[in-house]
Amino acid sequence: MPAVFGANARAEREVILEDQGTHVDPELERQLSAAGKRGKVQAVLTFRTPKHLKFLSGEETSGKIQAALDKLGDRDRPLCELRNVFPNLQSCVIEAPAHVIRAVLDENEIASATANQQPEDMLIRPVKKAAVKKATGKKAATKKATVKRSKK
C-alpha cells in the first residue's frame, strides 16, 4: 500500500480501519470451536471508534454495548450475560454460547475480540536479580572517579 501523507492521511487511515472488520484472538476462535452448541465462552469486546471521534465517552460506550446486545433479538439476548464494562477502554466482557458470541462478532461496531480466559499466565513476572560482585582495587577507584566527574 502506498504511503499517504498530508490531509488525506487521516481519511485514508480511517477507511482502512473501517474495511478491516473485527480482529479476533486465535485463542477466542479456539474456545468458540471447542464450546460446541451448549458451552459458554467469555469474550472481551472492544468497540470501534467512529470516524468523527478520537474516542468514545463512557456513555457512548455503554450505548454501543446495549445496541450490540439488543441486535441479538429475543431468542439469543437472554443467553448473553454482560459480565463487566470498561467504559474508558471502549470495551466489555460478555459470557454467552459460542453461536451468540459469533453473532455479536459480526456486528460492524466491534473492532476486536479476545478470550477473557487465557491459557497462559498474562502477568509479567519480575526477573530474578543476579548477584553482582563488588569491584575492588584499581578498577573500582577509576570507576568511582568517573562517576564523580559525570555528576558535575
Image: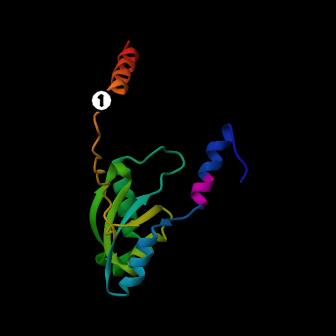
- Rendered location of residue 140, percent (x, y): 33, 26
Asked if residue 3 lies in the magenta stretch, the reply is no
- Rendered location of residue 67, percent (x, y): 39, 63
Q: How many marks?
A: 1
Magenta span of residues: 15-19
Quarter of the image where one finds residue 148: top left
> Chief secondary structure of the magenta span?
helix
Asked if residue 18 lies in the magenta stretch, the reply is yes
Question: Residue lying furthest right in this view?
Answer: 2
Quarter of the image where one finds residue 125: bottom left
Q: Residue at x 62, y 55 (%)?
A: 16
- Above or below residue 114? Residue 86 is above
Q: Residue at x 32, y 26 (%)?
A: 137
- Above or below residue 108? Residue 52 is above
Residue 6 located left or right of residue 75: right
Q: Nearer the viewer, residue 147 or 141?
A: 141
Amino acid identity at mark 1: Thr
Q: Nearer the viewer, residue 127 or 56?
A: 127
Q: Nearer the viewer, residue 38 or 108?
A: 38
Q: How is the image coloured?
A: rainbow
Q: Quadrant of the N terminus?
A: bottom right
- Rendered location of residue 114, percent (x, y): 40, 66
Please name the residue that numbered disc 1 is placed on. 136
Kind of element beneath mark 1: loop
Q: Nearer the viewer, residue 59 or 143?
A: 143
Q: Residue at x 35, y 82 (%)?
A: 75
Q: Quadrant of the C terminus?
A: top left
- Rendered location of residue 65, percent (x, y): 36, 61
| Structural crowding at the residue carrying mark 1, measured as other residues with C-alpha within 10 Å and reported as few (<14), some (14–19) or many (≥20) | few
